[in-house]
Image (cartoon, grey):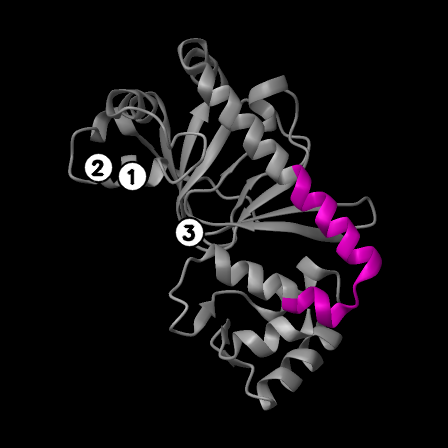
Amino acid sequence: MPTLRPHVTNHAAAFGMPSSTSRRNLLRNSPLFSHLEDSEADEILTEALITNYPEGTQIFAKGDPGDSMMAVLHGRVVISDSFSDGRQVLLTVLREGDVFGEMALLDGRERSANATAAAECELLVVRRDSFLSLLKHRPDVSMDLMVVLCERLRRTNEQVEDFAFLGLERRIAKLLLRLARETKQSAASPSRLKISQRTLGELVGGSRERTNKLLQNWKRAGIIAIENGSIEIRDTEALADLV
């Protein structure tokens, strides 16, 4: 996997331009920053860096120094773990408003997983010292951080239970429904998920062949459509019945 140099923009230089309002709104999509006043959000943006990563670029690797947290402003990020035999396991896919690397804000230790740009990404990078400064006068953000970490832990526990007790078909159906909810698309229109069959299989622990076979069965049944690296859910109720 190539490690490319990201394009880095110091937001202080661009602060006050029209994009600052949209970036402030995107920042507030994160549970950590949703309650900040405009001045506090602007302070975070002023001290932070905006980094751009092309698709396929490694953002950081397991074992790298952990001295910052990142928020996804645009694009998608895949979090994965790697093993000594070369295998990789996808842990989650992050989208706009999601934060990652937050454990480094608490202990300053090395990264516990890999992060890769699954699409062209614009990330907000918040240094640990800047975030700790915010916590000193906004203890409620500490509570929000605990909520985020608890949600991550609950999801990890649920994932372990799914791997232990659910078959592959139910795991795939459950994941597609969750991704559809997270995209916040209208219930009246089909949910189109930008995810490859390979990535989907890695997220649910299934081989590419078995995952493809199940998806093709659902496609013939009219439950989903597959096109150009995306999956469209056409019959949500039928998919839910499989869970």
Task: Find out whether the residues at labels 1 and 2 contact each other: C-beta distance under 8 Å.
Answer: yes
The earlier-in-sequence mark between 1 and 3 is 1
- Which stretch is magenta? 153-173
Q: Is residue 207 visible?
A: no
Asked whether 9 falls inside the magenta stretch, the response is: no
Badge number at residue 25: 1
Q: Which amino acid type is shown beneath numbered disc 3?
A: Gly
Residue 64 vs residue 125, the one in the foreground: 125
Q: For the residue labelled by badge 3, is the local secondary structure a helix, a strand or a loop?
A: loop
Could you tell whether 170 is left or right of 27 in the image?
right
Residue 181 pos. (x, y %): 49, 59
The earlier-in-sequence mark between 3 and 2 is 2
User: Residue, x 64% and y 64% (percent of image)?
Assistant: 174
Badge number at residue 109: none
Residue under numbered circle 2: 21
Asked whether 168 falls inside the magenta stretch, the response is: yes
Q: For the residue labelled by badge 2, is the local secondary structure a helix, a strand or a loop?
A: helix
Residue under numbered circle 3: 75
Q: CA distance from mark 1 to mark 3?
A: 15 Å
Which residue ends up furthest to the top in the rendered image? 136
Quarter of the image for residue 52 reads top left
Residue 107 pos. (x, y %): 63, 18
Q: Which amino acid type is shown beneath numbered disc 1?
A: Asn
